[in-house]
Structures are given as structure tokens and as C-alpha cells.
């Protein structure tokens, strides 16, 4: 059997996307293992979720380091100690800096709750709703030096209904996030992704 892709997840909050990834590894829907979960927020639910599944869970706070690069070096060291090949951001509420990017070139991916390039930044679902968008959605993309910007791996569209509130819309988008994030990881695990400039080619489609 081919060896599994080793993943490290970085999360700051509730970790429902982390949960979707863990569930997909446990049910064999993706050929990957979550080796470590790291959070910059010690009380993040994401860390508890990891522990509930026997996955090493580590809190690394920004304030424990004098500089961003020192902070990121600690994250990189922990990821490497656990043999991580792909870093998955799942509700990680910080901008990824040069240290992490250069340590994992084209090996960091993120999920954003809008159809990028629309509505980058915080509370994208609410931004889309307030803007009056008729179609919302979510995006899995490689991380580059700009926020919510790197080459797109997968997107899912979610129709905005007449009776939606920002909250009901967010809930339906989140359900799609939980579907496409594991799917994108599986494409990576199977070696099917090639980045050509802004375009991500998917082999065998
Ligand atoms: C998700 O909406 C994700 O798209 C965004 O942050 C949220 C994290 O949610 N980047 P959770 O922690 O995975 O529940």
C-alpha cells in the first residue's frame, strides 16, 4: 500500500473543518493522516478535537515569541518533528509569513468561506451576504504571501436564498467547506495537483 500523506493542521477556533478532515482520514475517504494539530489559541476547541482522536495537539502562542519569524519557526519545527508534508490551515486567524512559506513551499493550503477572489479577509460569508451576492461559496487554495490569494484548488458554489440570513448562509457554506476540503487534500495526496502560475492543473479530469 502506498504511504499516506502526512498532514499538520493549524487552527485557531472551533475546528469543524479539522473535524471533517479527521473524519475523512478515519473513514478512509482520504489517503492521509493528521499527525499534529497546532493552535495559536490554547483554549481552541480544535485542540480538544485532536486530543479526542489521539492526535498530538500543541498550543504555540504568538506572545511567547519575540518576533513573527521566531513564532513561525516554532510551528515549523513542530510540524517537521511530526513528519508533516502538507500544512492545512483550518480557521487559522493569522497571516502566514515568510518563515512558514519558505519552509513549506506550495505545501500550505487554506479554506476560505467565499468564492475567491471575492470577499477575502474576515467574515467573508457576511461580506457576501451584506453585498447582496446571489451566489456565495467557498474556496480551497494554496497559500502564498498575500491573504486569501494563492492558486485555487477547488471551489463550491452556494446559492443565496431569499429567506437567508448571514447565519443560515454561513451554515450552508460550512457544510460545503467540510465536503471540499477533504476532497482537495485527497487530490494533493494522490499527486494530482500541479501549480502553473495561478492555475492549478488537476490530473486525470
Ligand atoms: C471557516 O469558515 C473557514 O472557511 C475559515 O474559518 C472558519 C473556520 O471554521 N477560514 P472551523 O474552525 O473549521 O469551524
Image: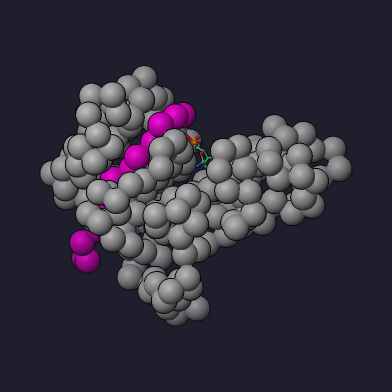
Is 11 magenta? The answer is yes
> Residue shown at 36%/25% (left/top)?
41
Name the residue furthest bottom.
204
Q: Is residue 174 or residue 29 the one in the foreground?
A: 174
Judge whether residue 28 can be spotted in this image.
Answer: no
Name the residue furthest front.
67
x, y (%) of residue 99? 25, 49
Is 83 magenta? The answer is no
Q: Is residue 160 or residue 68 the one in the foreground?
A: 68
Which quadrant holds the N terminus?
bottom left
Q: Is residue 29 or residue 7 the one in the foreground?
A: 7
> Residue shown at 46%/29% (left/top)?
14
Q: Residue 201's quadrant in the figure?
A: bottom left
x, y (%) of residue 82? 16, 44
With 33 as the anchor, is 157 left or right in this view? right
Q: Residue 172's quadrant in the figure?
A: top right
Q: Is residue 108 or residue 85 the one in the foreground?
A: 108
x, y (%) of residue 144? 40, 57
Q: Which residues are magenta?
A: 1-14
x, y (%) of residue 190? 34, 68
Name the residue furthest left.
81
Taking 42 as reference, is 78 above or below it?
Answer: below
Amino acid at each position: 500500500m502506498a504511504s499516506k500523506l502526512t498532514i499538520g493542521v493549524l487552527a485557531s477556533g472551533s475546528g469543524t473543518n479539522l473535524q471533517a478532515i479527521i473524519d475523512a482520514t478515519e473513514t478512509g475517504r482520504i489517503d492521509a493522516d493528521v499527525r499534529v494539530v497546532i493552535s495559536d489559541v490554547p483554549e481552541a476547541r480544535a485542540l480538544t478535537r485532536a486530543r479526542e482522536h489521539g492526535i498530538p495537539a500543541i498550543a504555540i502562542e504568538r506572545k511567547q515569541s519575540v518576533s513573527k519569524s521566531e513564532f513561525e519557526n516554532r510551528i515549523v519545527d513542530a510540524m517537521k518533528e511530526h513528519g508533516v508534508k502538507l500544512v492545512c490551515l483550518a480557521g487559522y486567524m493569522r497571516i502566514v509569513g515568510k518563515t512558514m512559506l519558505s519552509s513549506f513551499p506550495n505545501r500550505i493550503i487554506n479554506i476560505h468561506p467565499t468564492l475567491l477572489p471575492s470577499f477575502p479577509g474576515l467574515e467573508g460569508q457576511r461580506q457576501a451576504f451584506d453585498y447582496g451576492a446571489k451566489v456565495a461559496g467557498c474556496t480551497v487554495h494554496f497559500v502564498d504571501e498575500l491573504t486569501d490569494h494563492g492558486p485555487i484548488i477547488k471551489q463550491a458554489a452556494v446559492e443565496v436564498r431569499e429567506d437567508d440570513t448571514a447565519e443560515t448562509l454561513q451554515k450552508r457554506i460550512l457544510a460545503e467547506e467540510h465536503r471540499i476540503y477533504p476532497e482537495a487534500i485527497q487530490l494533493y495526496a494522490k499527486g494530482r495537483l500541479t501549480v502553473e502560475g495561478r492555475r492549478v492543473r488537476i490530473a486525470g479530469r
